[in-house]
C-alpha cells in the first residue's frame, strides 16, 4: 500500500520535487562564486563571508517553502476528493496519515541529498582562504532538519479540517490584535515578540531555523 | 559680427547667440550694438545683481536671527537643535551621554565641553551664524532613529577627543578614540580579522601567542616595521595587495611577486613614507585594545590615558589598563575569542530537539479528527 501511496504522491508533486532538486543542488554552488581568489586580502575575505551570509538566508527560506509545498501537495487530492479514497481503504486513519507522511518524507529526501552533494561539490571547487572552514555536512544536516520540520508542521495543519486551519489563523490573528490593543493602551506591547522569541529559541520548535546557515565560515 | 562670434568659439551659448544674430540683423537694431551701450547695460545688470544679493543676504540673516534654538545639556555635552527636531535629538543626546558614561564612568568630567548643532538634512532653515561659530553641525538623514543620531553624536565626540592625545597615539587609534562600549558585533569583526588575516603575526596571535599580538599591533613601536611586522611571504603578499604599485607599473613589483625577490619587496615597502605602511592588525583591532584597556582600568582609566605623564600608544594603554602589557593583551585576546560567531555545526541537543518536534507534529497529524468532523 505504501508503494501505491508513494506513487500517487510522486505523480502529484514530481514537478515540485524536480525543481527543488535543481535549486538545492545549485544553491551552494552559486553561493561560493566569490571564493576563487588564491591569496585574498582582509577585505576580500570579509566580502566572501558577507556573500555567503547573504546566500544563507535562502537556505532557510527554501527549506520552509519546500516543506510547505510537499505537505500541501500530499493532502490536496484527498481534500478535493472529500477523502472518499482514504475512507475506502481497510486501514485506520492514523495509519493512512502516517503512510502519507512517510511518502512525503521520502520525496523530501531527494532535494536534501541534492543540497548535500551540491555543498560538497561547491566546497571542493572553491578556494577557501586560510582561517576559514567549510561546513557542507553541517549545512546539509541543518537543511534536512529544517525542511522536515517545516514539512511536519504544514502536514499537521493540512491534515486537519478547514475549521482547524481557521482556528490556527484565528489564534494568530487574536495575538496580533491583542498586541495592537496593548500597545495602543500604553501597556506592555511585546506579547507577539515574547511568544516569537519562545518559538525560535531552544526548546522552541523553530530553533533550527535560527542558527548559522554558513557553508564557509570562520 | 555673427561670424566673428562663432569663430571666437562662443559655442556654449549656441541657441542664444543664434537668436541674437537673428534679432541683430534688423537695420533698426544695428545702431544700438556699439561697445559703450553694451558696457552700460552690463553695468546696470551687475548693479541689479549686487543689490539682489545684498537683499537676499539681509533676508537670510534675518531668518537666521529669527530661528529658535533649543539647547540640551548632558554633563559636558551640549546639543542644540531647532524645536521641530527636539523629539529625536533630546533622547539621542541622553543616549550618547549614557554610552560615554558607560565607558568613562567618573572620567566624563574630563571631557572638554563639546557643542553640537544637530538637525535633519531635510531642514530648510539656515544654521544661525552664532551657532556656526560655537558648535559643530551634525546633519542626520531624514527618518533616522534617535539611536542613529546618538551614534552620529558619539562618533563626532570620539573624533574630537583625539585632539587630547599625541600624534602617534592618534595614528594608532585611526584618528578617533573609542569612548563608547564596543558592541558585540564589533568584537566579532575583530575575531574574524584575527582568524582570517593572511599575516603570520596575526595568525600566531590568533593561536594565542600574546607577544605576537603586541608586535602585530605595533606595541611597542617597531624599529624596522617592514621586517618586524612582515616575513618574506607576507611582504610578497603585501606588495601584491597594494594597488599603488600596480598602477605605477613599478618593475620591482614584478620582481617581488613573480620572481620572488625579497630584496625588491623590501625596496618597495621601504620606499613608503612613514605612517603609510600599515601594521598587520587593523585600526579596528587596535582600537579594540583601547576599549579593553578602558574596561580593565575601571574608574579613572580614561584620566590615566590622557595623563601628561603618558606618551605614545603603549604607555597610554598600559596606564589606562593599570596592568602589565601581557595582562592587557591576555584580557584583550580572551575578549576577542569569546566574541567568535556561533559555529554553523548543529549541537546534539539542537538536532534532537528538532527531531522531537518533527515527531510531535507528525503525531498531531495522525490524531487529527478530519474524518469524524468533516
Image (cartoon, coloured by chain):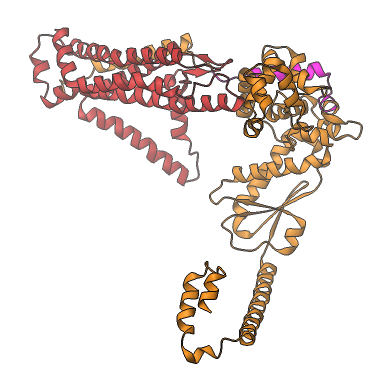
Chain colours: A red, B orange
- Residue A57 pos. (x, y %): 43, 27
User: Considering depth in this image, is B243 or B193 the residue closer to the camera?
Assistant: B243
Magenta segment boundaries in residue numbering: B317-342
Q: Main secondary structure of the magenta part?
A: helix
- Residue B104 pos. (x, y %): 77, 35
Up/down of A24 relative to B92, above or below: above
Give yes or no for residue B330 being in the magenta stretch.
yes
Tell whether B353 sits left or right of B158: left
> Residue sitting at 78 percent across and 39 percent down?
B162
Q: Residue A112 appears in which quarter of the rendering?
A: top left
Q: Residue B213 appears in which quarter of the rendering?
A: top right
Tell whether A105 sits left or right of B266: left
Q: Residue A162 appears in which quarter of the rendering?
A: top left
The number of numbered badges drawn on the structure is 0
- Residue B169 pos. (x, y %): 81, 33
> Residue sitting at 43 percent across and 26 percent down?
A55
Tell whether B124 sits left or right of A36: right
- Residue B343 pos. (x, y %): 53, 16
User: Considering depth in this image, is B199 or B266 the residue closer to the camera?
Assistant: B266
Q: Please say whether residue B366 is visible from this viewpoint.
A: yes
> Residue sitting at 85 percent across and 35 percent down?
B306
Amino acid at each position: 500500500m505504501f508503494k501505491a501511496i508513494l506513487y500517487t504522491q510522486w505523480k502529484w508533486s514530481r514537478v515540485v520535487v524536480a525543481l527543488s532538486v535543481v535549486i538545492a543542488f545549485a544553491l551552494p554552488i552559486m553561493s561560493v562564486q566569490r571564493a576563487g581568489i588564491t591569496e585574498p586580502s582582509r577585505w576580500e575575505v570579509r566580502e566572501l563571508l558577507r556573500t555567503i551570509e547573504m546566500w544563507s538566508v535562502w537556505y532557510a527560506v527554501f527549506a520552509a517553502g519546500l516543506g510547505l509545498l510537499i505537505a500541501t501537495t500530499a493532502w490536496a487530492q484527498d481534500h478535493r476528493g472529500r477523502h472518499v479514497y482514504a475512507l475506502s481503504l481497510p486501514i485506520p486513519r492514523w495509519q493512512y496519515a502516517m503512510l502519507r507522511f512517510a511518502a512525503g518524507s521520502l520525496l523530501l529526501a531527494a532535494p536534501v541529498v541534492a543540497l548535500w552533494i551540491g555543498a560538497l561539490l561547491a566546497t571542493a571547487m572553491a578556494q577557501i582562504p586560510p582561517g576559514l572552514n567549510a561546513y557542507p555536512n553541517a549545512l546539509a544536516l541543518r537543511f534536512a532538519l529544517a525542511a522536515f520540520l517545516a514539512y511536519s508542521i504544514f502536514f499537521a495543519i493540512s491534515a486537519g479540517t478547514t475549521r482547524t486551519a481557521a482556528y490556527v489563523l484565528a489564534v494568530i490573528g487574536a495575538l496580533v490584535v491583542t498586541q495592537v490593543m496593548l500597545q495602543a493602551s500604553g501597556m506592555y506591547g511585546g506579547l507577539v515578540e515574547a511568544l516569537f522569541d519562545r518559538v525560535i529559541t531552544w526548546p522552541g520548535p523553530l530553533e533550527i531555523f535560527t542558527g548559522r546557515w554558513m557553508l564557509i565560515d570562520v | 559680427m555673427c561670424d566673428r562670434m562663432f569663430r571666437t568659439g562662443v559655442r556654449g551659448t549656441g541657441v542664444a547667440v543664434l537668436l541674437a544674430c537673428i534679432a541683430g540683423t534688423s537695420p533698426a537694431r544695428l545702431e544700438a550694438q556699439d561697445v559703450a551701450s553694451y558696457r552700460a547695460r552690463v553695468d546696470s545688470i551687475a548693479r541689479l545683481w549686487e543689490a539682489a544679493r545684498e537683499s537676499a543676504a539681509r533676508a537670510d540673516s534675518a531668518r537666521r536671527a529669527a530661528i529658535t534654538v533649543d539647547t540640551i545639556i548632558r554633563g559636558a555635552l551640549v546639543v542644540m537643535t531647532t524645536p521641530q527636531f527636539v523629539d529625536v535629538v533630546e533622547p539621542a543626546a541622553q543616549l550618547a551621554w549614557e554610552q560615554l558614561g558607560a565607558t568613562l564612568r567618573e572620567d566624563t568630567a574630563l571631557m572638554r565641553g563639546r557643542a553640537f548643532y544637530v538637525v535633519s538634512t531635510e531642514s530648510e532653515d539656515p544654521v544661525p551664524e552664532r551657532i556656526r561659530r560655537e558648535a559643530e553641525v551634525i546633519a542626520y538623514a531624514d527618518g533616522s532613529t534617535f539611536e542613529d543620531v546618538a551614534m552620529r553624536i558619539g562618533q563626532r565626540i570620539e573624533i574630537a577627543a583625539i585632539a587630547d592625545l599625541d600624534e602617534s597615539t592618534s595614528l594608532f587609534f585611526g584618528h578617533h578614540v573609542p569612548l563608547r562600549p564596543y558592541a558585540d558585533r564589533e568584537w566579532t569583526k575583530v575575531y574574524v580579522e584575527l582568524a582570517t588575516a593572511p599575516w603570520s603575526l596575526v595568525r600566531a596571535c590568533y593561536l594565542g601567542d600574546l607577544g605576537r599580538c603586541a608586535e602585530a599591533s605595533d606595541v611597542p613601536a617597531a624599529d624596522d616595521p617592514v621586517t618586524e611586522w612582515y616575513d618574506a611571504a607576507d611582504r610578497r603578499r603585501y606588495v601584491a595587495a597594494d594597488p599603488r604599485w600596480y598602477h605605477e607599473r613599478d618593475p620591482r613589483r614584478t620582481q617581488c611577486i613573480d620572481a620572488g625577490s625579497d630584496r625588491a619587496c623590501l625596496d618597495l615597502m621601504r620606499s613608503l613614507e612613514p605612517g603609510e605602511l600599515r601594521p598587520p592588525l587593523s585600526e579596528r583591532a587596535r582600537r579594540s585594545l583601547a576599549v579593553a584597556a578602558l574596561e580593565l582600568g575601571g574608574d579613572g582609566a580614561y584620566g590615566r590615558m590622557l595623563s601628561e605623564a603618558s606618551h605614545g600608544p603603549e604607555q597610554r594603554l598600559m596606564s589606562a589598563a593599570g596592568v602589565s602589557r601581557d595582562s592587557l593583551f591576555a584580557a584583550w585576546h580572551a575578549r576577542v575569542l569569546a566574541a567568535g560567531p556561533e559555529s554553523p555545526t548543529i549541537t546534539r541537543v539542537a538536532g534532537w530537539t528538532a527531531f522531537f518536534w518533527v515527531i510531535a507534529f507528525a503525531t498531531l497529524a495522525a490524531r487529527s479528527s478530519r474524518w469524524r468532523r468533516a
